[in-house]
Amino acid sequence: MFQNVRAVLFDLDGTLVDSAPDLAGAADKMRLDRGLAPLPYEQYRPVAGAGARGLLGAAFGLTPDHADFPAMREEFFSNYERRMTERTYVFEGVADLIDAIVRRGMQWGVVTNKATRFTAPLTAAMDLFKSAGAIVSGDTTPHSKPHPAPLLEAAARLGVSPAHCIYVGDDERDIVAGRAAGMGTVAAAYGYLGAAADLSAWRSHASIKSPVELLNLIG
């Protein structure tokens, strides 16, 4: 699966950038606004990959079927929008990895379930993404991951066959989507996996413990 790789696609949060501090801050502000004590950051980080669902669950025990969830989610989104680049940073080794991919004449891009509302300003604010050939958000296509449609859209934008792409992500949905798209899949074991994650059950083609380890796979 890692022969003749022409393009590398990545998940965003938990794979390229660590946005958990800003996501946690957005949820904790909601607690503070209600006179509640802040929660330890360690309670937020493992659920950061689940977005509003995960953060509101950690902050308030709120589930998507609760009547207050839509309004609380929008409040969370507004809080996050105002602070999304305050404490978000690129994971160590990612910049070197992207430089190496570009030097090898390969293309790269992003496929995330994050809505364009957040993806566009976040990636525009970070120099890392200037060389990305495709940025596909969760609302770019009619389906989001684990459906393969966003990955196939990214491959089409790059003009590369899915068979010559690999997809790297820190969630089981990433691996499911990548396999369904016919791509080689790599689990980012350094991301927001959560305590219950069992990478062996994801059936990824490979896993990496740091971003630069990917270079060993793609030669």
Image (tube, rainbow, N blue to C red):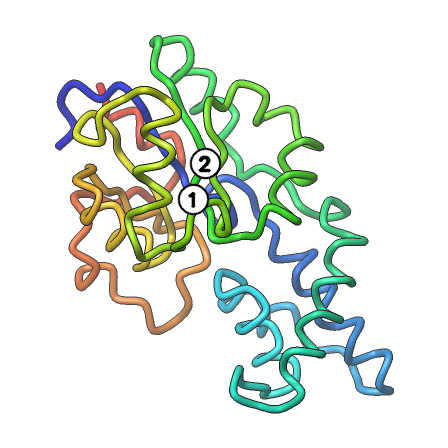
> Left or right: 219 with respect to 51?
left
Residue matched to label 1 = 11
Q: Which image quadrant: the C terminus?
A: top left
Element type where label 1 sits in the image: loop
Residue matched to label 2 = 110
Q: Residue 115 appears at what percent x and percent y?
A: 57, 52
Residue 4's quadrant in the figure? top left
Q: How many other residues sit within 10 Å of disc 1, few (<14), some (14-19) or many (≥20)? A: many
Up the image or down, 161 lies above or below 53; here it is above
Up the image or down, 110 lies above or below 22; here it is above
Q: Are marks 2 and 1 in contact (CB under 8 Å)?
A: yes
Residue 30's quadrant in the figure? bottom right
In depth, the one of 103 and 173 nearer the eye is 173
Residue depicted at x 39% and y 71%? 195
Q: Residue 111 appears at what percent x and percent y?
A: 43, 41
Residue 29's quadrant in the figure? bottom right
Real-space Cα distance between discs 2 and 1? 6 Å
